[in-house]
Image (cartoon, rainbow, N blue to C red):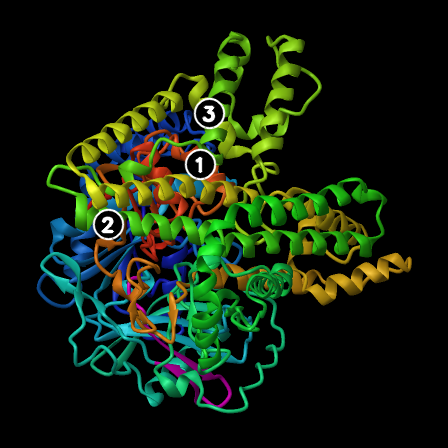
Amino acid sequence: MTMKIIVSLSDRQATLETVGGKGASLVRLFAAGLPVPDGFIVSTEAYWQFVAENGLREDILRALESVDLSRPSTLEEAAQRIQARFLEAQTPPEIASAIVHAYATLPGQNPAVAVRSSATAEDLPEASFAGQQETYLNVSSPDAVLEATKKCWASLWTARAIGYRARQGISPDGVALAVVVQLLVPAEVAGIMFTADPVTGQRDRVVLNASWGLGEAVVGGVVTPDSLTVDKGSGQVSARQTADKQVMTVCVNGGTQEQPVPESLRQVPVLGDEAAAELARLGVQIERLYQAPMDIEWTLADGRFAIVQARPITALPPAAPLPEPAAAPPTGPSFRAQRPSFRAHMDVPIHGISLEWKLPNPKGKYLRGSIVDYMPDPLTPLFGDMGPSVLTANMRRVIGEMLGTPDMVPADYVVTINDYPYINGAVTGRQGCLMLTRMAPKLPYMMRTTVARWRGQALPRYAEAVARWQQKPPQALAAAECLAGAREILDAAAYLVATLQTGPLGAAAGSETLFTAFYDKMVRREGDPPAPTYLLGFDSAPILAEKALFDLAGWCREHPALATYLADSPTPRLITGWTGEQAPPGVDTDCWREWQRRFRAHLDQYGHSIYDLDFAKPLAADDPTAVLEALKMYVRGQGTDPYERQQGLAGRREAAVAAVEGRTGGLKRKVFRKLLGWAQRLGPQREDGIADIGLGYPLLRRLLRELGGRLAEAGAIEQPDDIFWLRAEEAETAAATLDRGQAPGSMVAAVRQRKAEWQARKRVVPPPLLPLSKKYMGISMEGWLPVGADEQASDTLKGLGCSPGRVTATARVLRGPEDFGQMQPGDVLVAVLTTPAWTPLFAMASGVVTDVGGTLSHGSIVAREYGIPAVLGTGVATRRIHSGQTITVDGTAGEVHLA
């Protein structure tokens, strides 16, 4: 049987097995008469012959033998070995000749084409493999097409693709890759179209994202596109948001390049209503062809639309009625009337959603700062109902206790906008007056009593609430009591948070700011160390936790069999097995039990540090992955001795202080000593206070999961953790129903939809300040709030240089505890934010990059303690950087350079 190397787009006999998911979709669209650019497909049979004639199958399987999904470095190593073999291999002459001949039949002399990977396991209804393989645009010669084809074949074996298929259970022998070669549309406008709302699941509308130039800027999430919603029935545009489109992808010699959008086009709508209606009609036609809601990539050139890809939308929420819109404020214009709506982007595979960032109060000023830094994601439903209100109530309570009136704090102090929490920072005339007449005179008293109010009042109150509920086993409580206990513990935690905000957190930030300003302007000379040098080398809760873990590793090394087991075992195995009664083979039983006791004691003392104020997020006490990874590093003899590091920092600090005091005198020396002593005393208290916030969270989560377990047994939800996805009223009603001995109604569909919506919203970059501005009350917020997404379009991400130094290393993007097992010594830690619970990972990191944070946040303080460069507050690092990518972190300049 003759091998079929080239498959025409008009070949209706083409199958998924021969042309891959993308190719099969294009053939189907072409046959239906839809506007698909001309081209051809290099079949999977060509791929298999290329593999066979170069003996690559054995190389692939040999490289994959060492892959351990819990160790990302093994994926990278396997991918590099396989791809190197592919790129050095020769394309068989028969295949090369067929590709060159097919390319020559396309119209034009050396026409520009798009060369796109089409794997046999992609673009399927049950799983999207979007972005797993490569695409090459503006390829325009026979040799270039051959080279791009081989690169596409090699991209079947990237680390990301290998890991993704392994987690999906797809055998290495069960996947092949075809290559689609199509005429490149010189798009004037391009974008994404969804034939259902990807957030709400509504099927009666088409959602369009559109921007200038080629579609790569939209698909890749580097531009904020226009967003339009079109009613399927009438074809009318029901919603339109015109973005400030700062970047576009254009063709250059032999490839593409991102360029600034001309100023005259940045805020001009790219699609009129008539064009949007025409495009929506194409979308409806494609949806009918597939009998499923579709995710479609399209282009527009010379007034004509072209369809370049279509695939079923994965993870689409069940269709459900939209929630009732919030009542409009009684007076005042809407936010939409004040300024253009803000459109935030999200990453593939759901490429874009439209969100209007409407202010709850048109006169309000809303900031993503302060305690909101510890709520970086959209709030889960239960915490969203309980958290903001209890945080507001306790802030008002604490201010009332100190100043005699709570009215300095707005009644809507913590609010949610599109499920993201914001601080209402608007100041009324009365509040400004209260600040001058009541707060200002009491500031010295507030600063003097920070520790007394924290450790003498709020923390004991919190501890008492926890102790009271610890005496009641959750399984012995009524369902409503479980919820009541969680509420009481959350209230006590919120009172502590409010006390910290008005005490140690503010005092520490103020003292460091004052010392730094005085030192930089009045004391520092050329060659002197930066101000943070004078504040390093002190104990704090995170540093004590690290030293305790280092000591535990030292004890483990005294027992070689135990040390070998810990160092060599995959962390997931340790997570599931460390509580077991039976000792591992070769490990003495008494030694094993002592190890369990010591590790449990470590988690009891330090495992309550939160990653996030949202109580739906697990703690180290729930999932000690980060702790075990750091422990294993120390057991292997890797990492830095924290005692030696601290001693070195203390020595440099003392030498720097002595040098300053040796050359200054009089009032300057006195002020230097005063400010330095204040900053040194209060700095560690900030970290200790933040570590205290999670004191009751392990018990609070146990109470809620106990209720969740009962609801799961009753069939109301699928698993105990689904309790976090109920609204507070639903949880209360369900608990009361259980206590009456009745079965609650099913909430499974609602929970699934909320999870899908949360995942979609999590991909959005919330604006740091609303209404959109870089100033608050006339003060520039640069340096205090994250950089806006629209400002991060280039390959150099701007942020705050919070710990000096420069390092080039592999990035490891960690979105939460579930990813901690991916961290390897020497990686750059990339996260939304860090809290004291993240500290074990700093011992492994060569640098730190975050979306949220500033010079006074936890990440900057700990990074300086560890002597590693840190760039914080980039706004988009976790979206622009991917794990395995080589990046350069310049903590001195406040820049992250993407390779």
Disc 3 marks which residue? Answer: 547
Foreground: disc 2 or disc 3: 2
Closest to the observer, 144 or 569: 569
Q: Which x, y percent locates residue 874?
A: 31, 55
Of helix, strand and loop, which one carries label 3? helix
What whole-number distance in Å separates the C-alpha atoms at marks 1 and 3?
11 Å
Q: Which x, y percent locates residue 144?
A: 14, 51
Q: Give yes or no for contact between labels 1 and 3 (Cβ–Cβ under 8 Å).
A: no
Amino acid tagged 1 = Thr
Crowding at dot 2, Cα within 10 Å, few <14 / some 14-19 / many 20+, comes out as some
The magenta segment: 222-241
Of helix, strand and loop, which one carries label 1? helix
Disc 1 marks which residue? Answer: 839
Crowding at dot 3, Cα within 10 Å, few <14 / some 14-19 / many 20+, comes out as some
Return the disc, 2 or 3, that comes first in the chain's sequence: 2
Q: Give yes or no for contact between labels 2 and 1 (Cβ–Cβ under 8 Å).
A: no
Q: Does 186 appear above or below 509? A: below
Closest to the observer, 647 or 678: 678
Crowding at dot 1, Cα within 10 Å, few <14 / some 14-19 / many 20+, comes out as many
Residue positioned 39% across, 53% down in the render: 20
Q: Give yes or no for contact between labels 2 and 3 (Cβ–Cβ under 8 Å).
A: no
Return the disc, 2 or 1, that comes first in the chain's sequence: 2
